[in-house]
Image (cartoon, rainbow, N blue to C red):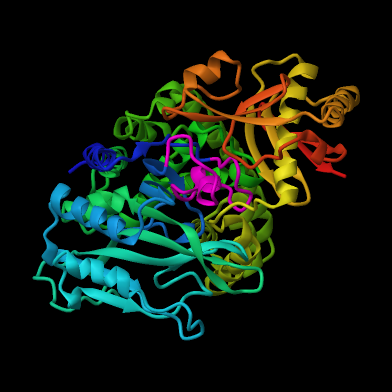
Amino acid sequence: MDRKGLIHKFLEFYKSKGHKEIQNSSLIPENDPTVLFTTAGMHPIVPFLLGKPHPLGKRLCNVQRCIRTGDIEEVGDKVHHTFFEMLGKWSLGDYFKKEAIEYTFEFLTKILKIPKERLGFTVFGGDKRFPNLPRDEEAAKVWISLGVPKERVAYLEGGVLESKDNWWGPAGLTGPCGPSTEMFYWTGKEKAPKIFNPRDSKWVEIGNDVLMQYNKTKDGKFEELTKKNIDFGGGVERIIAVMNDIEDDYLSNCFFPIIQEIEHLSNRPYKGNEKVMRIIADHIKASVFMIGDGVIPSNTGQGYVLRRLIRKTIMNLRKIGFVGTDLINPIASRVFEIYEDYDLLKKKQKEIYKEIKKEEEKFDETLEKGMKIFEKMIKDKKEIDCKDAFLLYQSYGFPIEMTQELAQERGKKVDKEGFEKECCLHQELSRTASAGTFKSGLADNSDATTKLHTATHLLAQALREVLKKPDLYQKGSNITAERARFDFNFERKLTEEEIKKVEEIVNKKIKEKIKVEYQELSPAEAKKMGAQGVFDSKYGEKVSVYSIGNFSKEICAGPHTKNTSELGEFKITKEESSSAGVRRIKAILK
């Protein structure tokens, strides 16, 4: 089975069960300040999981492109990926556990034709700290009623506070949460054991139904939700690998064409070079999709992650014999072949190649500077200490192996053990510092963020008018309770006079006490009425349009106030460059 076949079967199956397909959204989340990238299919429907009606109804499905950076250091093994696609289905206050599990089981056994003997399931086993959250006998009974032997249903205890072991959320301190039930596939060559042990590595997770049953309150209590949700997620790459009896995800059709190109260009086999080739394949694929969604290499935010991926790719290419520049694009060409069903990649192919080549050239200059620093370091030393080795690695992209080779040529030693300790310390500090940023979860829909989000609609339209740029649009946003950050396409720095005019227009609209109105329209109707939106993306049959009088009309799923009078005084605190061709405004409401 290939990826397009799997995706088609999944979507058609759930459409036959009354689900509507929603768009495969950008990797840059619109309304979730807790993450740099879209990390799961749930991100585009955050407001609807919180209770807002979805224009397409209560049953939804899609395939969503995702980026996860939390375990980026793990890439290189058989199963970790930075970019991946996720199959998703949702019930928003409609069906619950019984139907969700029955649909999942039918899809696995009837549509994908997985033998029941190779399946195992975990359910929430309760948490002794919370007596009112019993183990999920209901979910277990549904699995058993479908013919699953009771020995193949495992209860996993604990995890409510840690959001693990069959418990999901809430992402913040409060909000929807609940038990989950996971599906596992036996990958061993021998017959699957009678008793399912999810800790056995031969049992591989292929999907997870989150059963949002409770609401966690501010005082830490868990209350039964009146409207319960289902959120299913399943990794495309993982399912394809197990369905084809492939132990290494990188040998599946989602990756192998890229691996083959690396083998061809390096004249080296995959066997014996697995780790380095996996890293190269993974990072190139992720980079292509990031640039396709408008990310440009930089030293902050998403741009920093992209820059890190490209530069790490170059260093790994050098390890297997590549020299010079323009190393990545010949390999990247295979990504476009695998994902030829993504129109955004087709349209931006030249731009993607251009950005990758530009970053390679910049890094080549950095490496030259690094060589000069290296020569100074070794001039009067017998050994390159851990601090110097780490500086070469962190600031100039020198892998420790490269530093060792250069030092050996000059009869010098390198403190490799000290370097590795320094790397571990840095990684731990990085993880701690970015824990909040890379955490997945529901957006903060507090009054403060709702007001700031509404204000960004006014800001966007004011910018279009002041800068006389009708095609100005959002390139990214990050909204917390304290401030709004709004990125938009524009080539130059704004003048003080322009900033002042923008503020005046926004505050004028706030004082006019304009009603914020909501409509559900078809994309064609939304476009006809002048709503702002990227109409080349795959919208569903209906979209949410928010109008602020005749001033602003935008397709948006985020939280909004009912009237501009609720906003207070708008103030721009900073205007700066975000990346090439993109400006950034930070603003507050007093």
Q: Is residue 451 visible?
A: yes
Q: Is residue 527 above or below residue 575?
A: above
Vertical position of residue 338 compared to residue 441: above or below: above
The answer to whether 435 appears left or right of 543 in the picture is right
**Quick one: which residue is furthest to the front in this view?**
226
**In screen coordinates, is 238 left or right of 285?**
left
Q: Is residue 322 visible?
A: no
Q: Position of residue 268 (x, y in %)?
A: 27, 47
Task: From the image, give the main secondary structure of the stretch colored magenta.
Answer: loop
Q: Is residue 467 left or right of residue 555?
A: right
Q: Is residue 412 magenta?
A: no
Q: How many marks?
A: 0
Quarter of the image for the C terminus: give it: top right
Q: Quadrant of residue 377?
A: bottom right
Quadrant where the N terminus lies? top left
Question: In the rendering, at what x and y percent does residue 130 appear?
Answer: 50, 81
Q: Which residues are magenta?
A: 28-57
* Pick the front one: 569 or 380: 569
**Camera-side residue: 192 or 417?**
192
**Residue 396 percent coordinates (x, y):** 61, 50
Q: Is residue 445 left or right of residue 228?
A: right
